[in-house]
Amino acid sequence: MLALTTDQIVSFLGLFWWPFCRLMGAFALMPMLGSSYTPVTVRILLAASISGILVPVLPAMPHIDPLSIQGVLVAGEQMLVGAMMALFVNMLIVTMTMIGAMMAMQMGLAMAMMNDPSSGSSNPIIGQWLLIYAILLFLSLDGHLVSIGIMVDSFHLWPVGSGVLGLPLMSLVSKFGWMFASAFMVALPVIIAMLLVNITFGVLSRAAPSLNVFALGFPMSMLMGLFCVLFSFSGLPSRYSDFCIEALQSMQNFIGGS
């Protein structure tokens, strides 16, 4: 007859429960998986499946009762660690939305909003277009596999029970500035081109006040903006791949990798 002690049951549950908590925290903010379009059941089953596969290769887990108060605190800590790691990838996708918002604002399409049921917010339609483009390009570059691989390595680099305060939290905060700077860098040529167009129509309105500059300038600004967006796509994939490498590298450095 098979007899299991309480310590053995707690150790067995810990091998599965702590990786499951960290993965669930990551999947809550991970692009595609963190969207409301993805059912919670799918996220739970995916996290449980990956946790079950990782059990033989994970390091020894701390002997903590998952049902105790300390176990609840450690579970919350693991979900927070996973969420902070996934935030690097999430900021990568948000950068593309900001690029589209900056372009749309200069083109006069800021009022062309599209409601996003997944987040409950409204974004310019060009921002939504670039968001879909960024997600598809991220999948084509196998970014989702690399990010899950970093999550697996995190159990060796930052073992369960190491806490949260020891993580380089300032590097995570500094990534918000990187997100704005990256979006502005990509959208800067479009901003400058549209600024020159607006200056040209301003000079034209002063030189020939009889012309209806509003009737002529708005369609021309929109047409020029669409050409600028088209030209921006020539170098956008290479820039986006650099952003992916930097974001994933920062994600690994966050938990002590190199």
Image (spheres, rainbow, N blue to C red):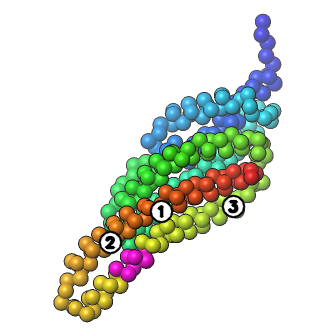
The residue indicated by pointer 1 is 235
Quarter of the figure with residue 247: bottom right
Tell me which amino acid carries mark 3: Ser
Q: Quick check: 39 left or right of 50?
A: left
Q: Is residue 17 highlighted in magenta? A: no
**Which residue is at the far bottom?**
207
Magenta span of residues? 191-197
Q: Is residue 59 something that shows in the picture?
A: yes
The residue indicated by pointer 3 is 171
Residue 238 coordinates in the image, percent (x, y):
52, 58
Determine which of the numbered discs, if any, sits on residue 224 in the image.
2
**CB within 8 Å, label 2 to label 3:** no
Helix, strand or loop for disc 2: helix
Residue 26 coordinates in the image, percent (x, y):
61, 44
Query: Which residue corresponds to the image point at 62% horizontal and 57% vertical from the top-left?
Result: 246
- The residues tagged by marks 3 and 1 sit, at their Cα atoms, a distance apart of 28 Å
Query: Which residue corresponds to the image point at 58% horizontal and 54% vertical from the top-left?
Result: 244
Tell which of 43 and 220 is nearer to you: 220
**CB within 8 Å, label 2 to label 1:** no
Q: Quick check: 9 left or right of 96?
A: right
Quarter of the figure with residue 56: top right
Helix, strand or loop for disc 1: loop
- The residues tagged by marks 2 and 1 sit, at their Cα atoms, a distance apart of 18 Å
**In terms of sequence position, does the residue under pointer 2 or pointer 3 come before the other?**
3
Residue 211 vertical placement versus 73 (above, below): below
**In terms of sequence position, does the residue under pointer 2 or pointer 1 come before the other?**
2
Residue 9 coordinates in the image, percent (x, y):
76, 23
Tell me which amino acid carries mark 1: Gly
